[in-house]
Amino acid sequence: MKDYISERAVKIANYIIQNNATVRQTAHAFGVSKSTVHKDVAERLLYINPHLAAEARKVLDINKSERHIRGGMATREKYLHQHG
């Protein structure tokens, strides 16, 4: 694996942990695709730093489990401002 990819995977994981960031937020911050964020955390980082990979995975799993709530809140806000 190229050094810059390894470094990016570590930076992405640290960013996710420090900012409690979603995949989408992380992808935007690093200028990469959501697929790249997933691949860096779920696959590449396991070989580089398994502990860091596990920590980042925890944050992403929590964000995923709360995703439907955030979506519902966004829809609610949209309609409150439209009809209010």
Image: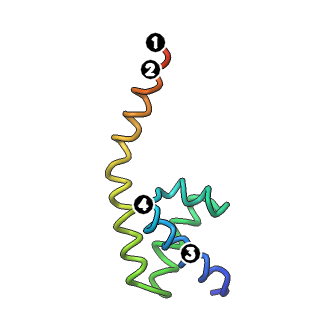
Residue 29: where, in percent of width, then height?
61, 59
> Mark 1 or mark 3, which has the lower sequence index?
3
Measured in 3D between alpha carbons, the distance from the residue under mark 4 to the one under mark 2, in whole angstroms, is 27 Å
**Which residue is labeled 4 in the image?**
20
Q: Give SS at disc 1.
A: helix
Answer with mark 2 or mark 3, whichever residue precedes in sequence. Answer: 3
Q: Which residue is mark 1?
A: 83
Amino acid on which disc 3 is placed: Lys
- Is 49 situated above or below 29? below
Instruction: For mark 3, give the secondary structure.
Output: helix
Label 1 vs label 4: CA separation?
Answer: 32 Å
Q: Position of residue 33 (x, y in %)?
A: 62, 59
The mark that comes first in sequence, 4 or 2, is 4
Between circles 4 and 2, the one closer to the viewer is 4
Q: Amino acid at mark 2?
A: Tyr
Residue 1 location in percent, x, y? Answer: 63, 87
Q: Residues within 10 Å of mark 4 (few under 14, many from 20)?
A: some
> Mark 2 sits on what residue?
79
